[in-house]
Image: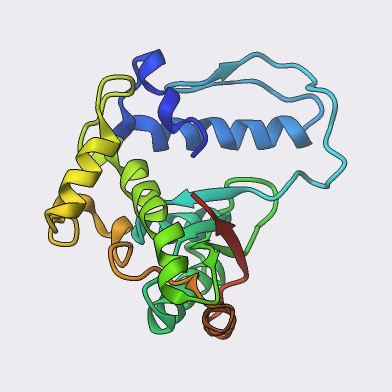
Amino acid sequence: GATRLELGGFDIPAREKRAMALEAAEQIANMMVMEPYPGFEGRSFKMPCRNVLPKPVQKPHPPMWMACTNRDTIKVAASLGVGALAFSFIDEAEARTWSQIYYDIIKSDACVPLGHSVNANIAMVSAFSLHADRAEAARRGQEGFEFFRYAISALVTNDAVPGRSKLFEQFQKERSGGALGADAAGTEALSGAFQQSRGIGTAEDFKAHVRSFESAGVDQIILLQQ
């Protein structure tokens, strides 16, 4: 996910990013484990035979993750045996459903690990803005979190051009006009973001939020402030 905004500088279409990333990720895992690394030449990645140093302290290599900007990517992550870094689920029932889907695939023959180990993990990004006054928590945190969700999908869903598109102005216009919640182009990665986000509210609200996702099978929560 960290390379999302740098694609334009290399003239790489955003829609081709996943296949390129997976091809490279598999080879990078091999470099961390194999001695020597036998070399590889694929569609978008090539490296000659060599011993790549240093080897990681974690064995066989650090845990691998996939950023899941839409729900179906959770299935892809499970099929590759990597952790799923997901966006906040709408409610506990949805979290439970996707946790079940993810772990059912992990346990099945459909899971063919991309690396040399399986990282069975679901991590959820959650908004985080707390205040004794729920309305004040929303005033401080809601718009920023909504814009984060809007912006991360803009390159693919809206063909935004880094350095040219005025994303925040477009976001504010659509938000004030009520278009965001109804805009199918926003993709389900934005689902629920334009309601009161979970993780924004009082401390008691947040305790309930964390406990509900723990019981639904979410392994880790990543707190996001914007």
Q: Residue at x 48, y 49 (%)?
A: 226
Q: How is the image coloured?
A: rainbow
Do we see residue 59 in this rendering? yes
Q: In the rendering, at what x and y percent does residue 223 appear?
A: 58, 60
Residues 90 and 75: in front is 90
Residue 28: name its quadrant: top right
Q: Nearer the viewer, residue 113 or 164?
A: 164
- Residue drawn at (45%, 21%) of the image: 44
Q: Is residue 213 left or right of residue 34?
A: left
Relative horizontal placement of residue 124, taking residue 121 as reference (left or right): left
Q: Residue at x 74, y 46 (%)?
A: 62
Q: Position of residue 225 (x, y in %)?
A: 53, 53
Q: Is residue 69 visible?
A: no
How far across and how far down the image is residue 210, in percent? 58, 78
* Left-right relation of 30 to 137: right
Look at 48% across and 76% down and name the residue there: 133
Up the image or down, 173 lies above or below 39; here it is below
Is 2 rendered above or below residue 60?
above
Q: Position of residue 195 (x, y in %)?
A: 29, 69
Would residue 19 appear left or right of 31 to someone viewing this image?
A: left
Which image quadrant is residue 95 in? bottom left
